[in-house]
């Protein structure tokens, strides 16, 4: 099959004889229809290896079609469309048992054993796959995975009706968090984002304010929050400077949510401010089975309309070029979808 292999920082190679994924009895073999480029893929391209080994086949935001069903799998048929998480989990540890398979104790071992979805085919544990209604357009279905990440972040933040929210960074995850925070009953939402195009999208997705970090942002946010700061600040930019402002913009006893991947790995925390203001510093990584089920419903029903986020479709052969364009000007795009079988 064809697969795009990240050989080194900044360099994909299209391998046209990459081995087809092997199927275990509990797996599905899937033909990838569309696979979105995630900010975390871009971080691997620019500064990897961070969370994935190198070389490897990246890609995890897919909508795919079942082409083969493992002998022990029930509930899936050839031709079904699915989304979910490829990397195997053990199914037995305390996290797997409650559906938090992305926190599985063996997760570190499993990443890299399988090729990601920048390839024609993937093998995926059926237990971590979720059916998509056949009438859902495949491009929109490819955004269910990032939507599940946003669902997870909203849930981890314990956002309540009437709270004030700040979202740092209007990449796809920041934009999806904005839309879901609105849906979850946030009173006011401010998004901080340097790219004008993404600030416009933030308003489309439900933000009240879209601010450029080059301007003074604390004034308008304090005004929006009656001078107390935001109840919840989502740091979805991966920029250490944005993290520092996020800390200042969180109200006393508020929640500071870490959602982004950081290329530099370490962050500075103003310990005495976090202590004095009793901030809850929380992290949200990926999604669990509840989040996936909710995201399937939200996207399929268009209660969460992901169409404004789709910037472009490219062929698998053009992956290098798409990543280079994203690396040099990511603010220009929201989600680029890769057509893996054209
Ligand atoms: Zn992702
Ligand atoms: Zn496990």
Image: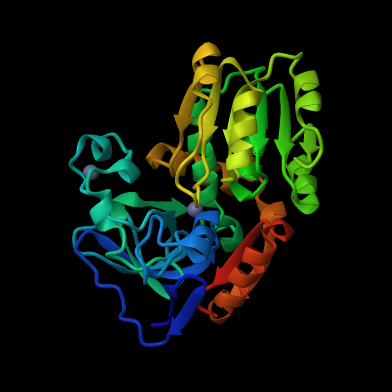
Q: Who's the residue at 56% across and 70% down the image?
A: 338
Colouring mode (rainbow / by chain / secondary structure / one colour): rainbow
Where does the N terminus fall, quadrant-wise? bottom left
Image x and y of residue 105, in percent: 23, 43
- 106 over 186 or under it: above or below: below
- 126 over 340 or under it: above or below: above
Nearer the observer, 141 or 191: 191
- Answer yes or no: is residue 125 visible: yes
Q: Who's the residue at 55% across and 62% down the image?
A: 37
Image x and y of residue 165, in percent: 66, 26
- 20 over 197 or under it: above or below: below
Quadrant assignment, res 184: top right
Taking the image as shown, residue 278 lies to the left or right of residue 203, namely left
Taking the image as shown, residue 31 lies to the left or right of residue 200, namely left
Quadrant assignment, res 79: bottom left
Residue situated furthest bottom in the rendering: 17
- Answer yes or no: is residue 185 visible: no
Nearer the observer, 49 or 234: 49
Q: Who's the residue at 35% across and 82% down the image?
A: 18
Q: How many numbered circles are shown?
A: 0
Where does the C terminus fall, quadrant-wise? bottom right
Image x and y of residue 329, in percent: 70, 62
Nearer the observer, 108 or 337: 108
- 157 over 102 or under it: above or below: above
């Amino acid at each position: 099959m064809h697969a795009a292999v990240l050989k080194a920082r900044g360099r994909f190679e299209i391998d046209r004889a990459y081995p087809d994924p092997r199927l275990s009895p509990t797996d599905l073999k899937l033909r990838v229809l569309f696979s979105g480029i995630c900010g975390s893929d871009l971080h691997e391209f620019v500064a990897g290896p961070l969370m994935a080994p190198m070389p490897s086949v990246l890609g995890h935001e897919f909508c795919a079609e079942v082409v083969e069903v493992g002998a022990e799998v029930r509930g899936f048929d050839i031709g079904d469309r699915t989304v979910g998480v490829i990397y195997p989990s053990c199914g037995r540890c305390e996290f797997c048992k409650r559906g938090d398979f992305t926190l599985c104790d063996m997760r570190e071992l499993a990443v890299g054993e399988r090729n990601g979805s920048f390839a024609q085919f993937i093998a995926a544990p059926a237990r971590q796959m979720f059916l998509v209604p056949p009438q859902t357009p495949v491009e929109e279905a490819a955004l269910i995975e990032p939507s599940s990440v946003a669902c997870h972040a909203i849930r981890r933040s314990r956002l309540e009706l009437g709270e004030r929210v700040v979202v740092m960074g209007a990449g796809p995850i920041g934009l999806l968090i904005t839309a879901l925070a609105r849906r979850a009953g946030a009173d006011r939402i401010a998004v901080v984002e340097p790219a004008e195009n993404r600030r416009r999208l933030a308003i489309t997705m439900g933000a009240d304010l879209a601010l450029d970090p080059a301007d003074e942002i604390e004034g308008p946010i304090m005004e929006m929050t009656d001078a107390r700061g935001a109840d919840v600040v989502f740091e979805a930019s991966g920029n250490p400077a944005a993290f520092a402002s996020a800390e200042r913009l969180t109200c006393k006893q508020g929640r500071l949510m870490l959602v982004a991947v950081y290329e530099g790995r370490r962050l500075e925390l103003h310990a005495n401010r976090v202590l004095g203001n009793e901030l809850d510093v929380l992290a949200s990584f990926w999604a669990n089975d509840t989040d996936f089920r909710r995201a399937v419903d939200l996207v399929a029903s268009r209660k969460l309309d992901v169409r404004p986020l789709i910037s472009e479709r490219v062929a698998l052969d053009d992956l290098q070029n798409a990543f280079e364009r994203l690396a040099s000007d990511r603010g220009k795009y929201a989600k680029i979808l890769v057509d893996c079988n054209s």
